[in-house]
Image (cartoon, rainbow, N blue to C red):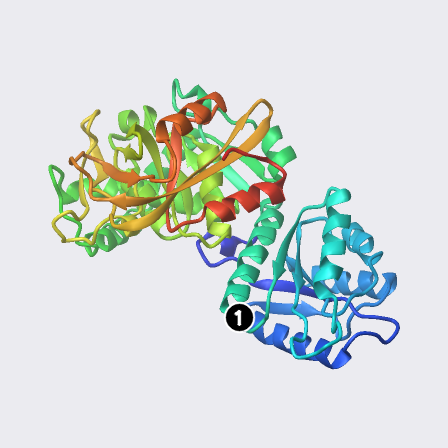
């Protein structure tokens, strides 16, 4: 994965397009051309940079050549378009040449015709069954290229396939290890590589501390000035407390660039507040706000959960404890690491401020509740029984009934008994951290689990 992706830029929008043609005339070829033209227009409207052969593929040779071209241009997702029924045998050729999930798009029949115009849905259904029997994951889209619903479905399907491909080239850094006693977040590098394809990159905590201390003073001063321009109120701390967090921020930024990391987790306690005199949570908040995925407490799988969301274009996540629950609500809380974009506006009555950690009274954490009155998704990726699992649940953030230090959110979950769900998750080995995202994304996470061939915990 490129360093541009590591530093928070949008993931690549390159999309390989493989159009299946026919050696012999058949069906309504005028309709075929109309669908191909409309498909091109739809993909352009979705923001994709489409890479394809000049002509539809019709046999093994043209299929292999087209996929070779698509791969050489750096595409991480492949869309198969079949506007007229073609050779079903090519499904196996494609599965030999493309080792990642792909998107099958079936286009509609010509409604005003009294004869079958394309058999596109039949053709893609045939391919779907062949790919499934061959053990190859895929996403399926059926619809008119002009319809907004179809274009949304295409974007989501392509993002899912691209995420699986991108993860195979991703690097997740771990500074130190999991926090003391948090055994449920112990990392398994070989399993990450085997199941997810990502690479674990261990890094030294003492060296990170030395790096933070050695940051150039002028660079620290510039970053402190940038933080002060954010106009965050100071509650029990002073401007003099900003420099150490700027050192954390700049040191992590350096590591991400130097090691080409796509996400990272940091063992933030007890060493950092004890040795450096500060918690790094303001730095984590800022970095995540900017699209750099950084997890606290050495939670590598939490970092990977956030990376999946980033690749899926679902936005930033808040790694949080599951603090308490009732039948249809959950209170989430953590001591001050939430991305500022998830909080209320700076300067508002419930806006974020900077303060001390609630437990070990040292700076520098972000205090303030998350914004309410919007849809959210609770998600988590984790390992248990030598395999990976993924879960997600949708709800709505509502105004909290009490105010807590750090960051917190009250989420209503009307469609399930939270007590039963929590019990199931405990018995599935899910760690005490989950990740909160804005918007409803449960179905996207479910389909991603299927494409990654990992267990979906409903």
Tell me the SS state at disc 1. Answer: loop
Residue 147, image x, y percentages: 53, 70
Residue 40, how many percent across, how many down?
62, 74
Query: On the rendered structure, is 262 left or right of 278?
Result: right
- Quarter location, residue 28: bottom right
Q: Above or below — where is 146 with respect to 429? A: below
* Front-most of residues 376 and 245: 376
Q: Nearer the viewer, residue 19 or 424?
A: 424
Q: Position of residue 126 (x, y in %)?
A: 76, 55
Instruction: Report the front residue among 338 and 108.
Output: 108
- Position of residue 213 measured from the top left corner of the image (x, y, whole percent): 33, 37
From the viewer's side, name the closer residue of 273 and 167: 167
Kindly identify the residue that appears in the image at 81 percent across and 63 percent down: 63
Q: Residues within 10 Å of mark 1 (few under 14, many from 20)?
A: few
Placement of 331 over or under 372, stated as above or below:
above
Residue situated furthest bottom in the rendering: 30
Residue on which disc 1 sits: 147
Q: Residue furthest toward the top?
A: 181
138 in relation to 58, above or below: above
* Residue 180 horizontal side relative to residue 99, left or right: left
Extreme residue toward the front, this view:
114
- Total marks placed: 1
Vertical arrangement, residue 273 with respect to residue 257, above or below:
above
Would residue 81 be visible to someone looking at this image? no
Residue located 21% across and 31% down the image: 357
Q: Quadrant of residue 23?
A: bottom right
* Residue lying at 20% horizontally and 56% vertically, measured from the top left: 229
**59 to the left or right of 32:** right
- Residue at 46% x, 30% y is 204
């Amino acid at each position: 994965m490129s360093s541009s992706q590591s530093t928070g830029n949008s993931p690549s929008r390159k999309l390989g397009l493989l159009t299946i043609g026919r050696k012999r005339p058949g069906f309504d070829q005028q309709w075929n051309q109309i669908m191909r033209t409309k498909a091109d227009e739809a993909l352009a409207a979705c923001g994709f940079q489409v890479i394809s052969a000049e002509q539809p593929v019709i046999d093994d040779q043209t299929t292999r050549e087209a996929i070779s071209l698509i791969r050489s241009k750096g595409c991480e997702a492949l869309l198969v378009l079949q506007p007229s029924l073609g050779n079903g045998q090519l499904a196996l050729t494609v599965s030999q040449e493309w080792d990642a999930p792909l998107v099958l798009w079936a286009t509609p029949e010509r409604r005003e015709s009294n004869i079958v115009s394309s058999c596109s849905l039949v053709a893609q259904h045939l391919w779907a069954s062949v790919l499934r029997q061959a053990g190859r994951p895929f996403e399926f889209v059926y619809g008119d290229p002009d319809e907004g619903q179809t274009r949304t479905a295409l974007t989501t399907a392509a993002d899912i396939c691209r995420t699986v491909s991108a993860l195979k080239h991703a690097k997740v850094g771990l500074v130190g290890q999991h926090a003391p006693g948090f055994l449920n977040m112990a990392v398994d590098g070989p399993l990450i590589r085997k199941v997810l394809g990502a690479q674990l990159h261990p890094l030294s905590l003492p060296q990170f501390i030395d790096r933070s201390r050695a940051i150039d003073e002028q660079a620290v001063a510039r970053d402190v000035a940038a933080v002060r321009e954010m106009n965050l109120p100071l509650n029990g701390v002073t401007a003099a407390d900003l420099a150490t967090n700027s050192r954390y921020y700049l040191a992590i930024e350096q590591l991400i660039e130097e090691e080409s990391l796509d996400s990272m987790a940091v063992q933030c306690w007890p060493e950092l507040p004890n040795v450096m005199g500060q918690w790094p949570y303001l730095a984590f908040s800022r970095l995540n706000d900017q699209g750099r995925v950084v997890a606290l407490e050495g939670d590598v799988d939490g970092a990977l959960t956030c990376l999946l969301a980033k690749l899926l274009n679902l936005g930033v996540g808040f790694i949080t404890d599951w603090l308490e629950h009732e039948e249809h609500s959950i209170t989430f809380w953590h001591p001050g690491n939430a991305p500022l974009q998830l909080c209320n506006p700076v300067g508002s009555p419930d806006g974020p401020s900077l303060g001390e950690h609630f437990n070990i009274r040292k700076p520098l954490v972000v205090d303030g509740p998350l914004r309410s009155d919007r849809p959210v998704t609770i998600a988590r990726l984790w390992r248990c029984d030598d395999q990976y699992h993924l879960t997600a649940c949708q709800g709505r953030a509502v105004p909290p009934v009490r105010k807590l230090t750090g960051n917190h959110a009250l989420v209503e979950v009307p469609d399930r008994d939270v007590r039963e769900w929590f019990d199931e998750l405990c018995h599935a080995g899910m760690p005490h951290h989950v990740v909160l995202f804005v918007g409803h994304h449960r179905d996207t996470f479910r389909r991603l689990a299927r494409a990654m061939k990992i267990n979906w915990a409903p």
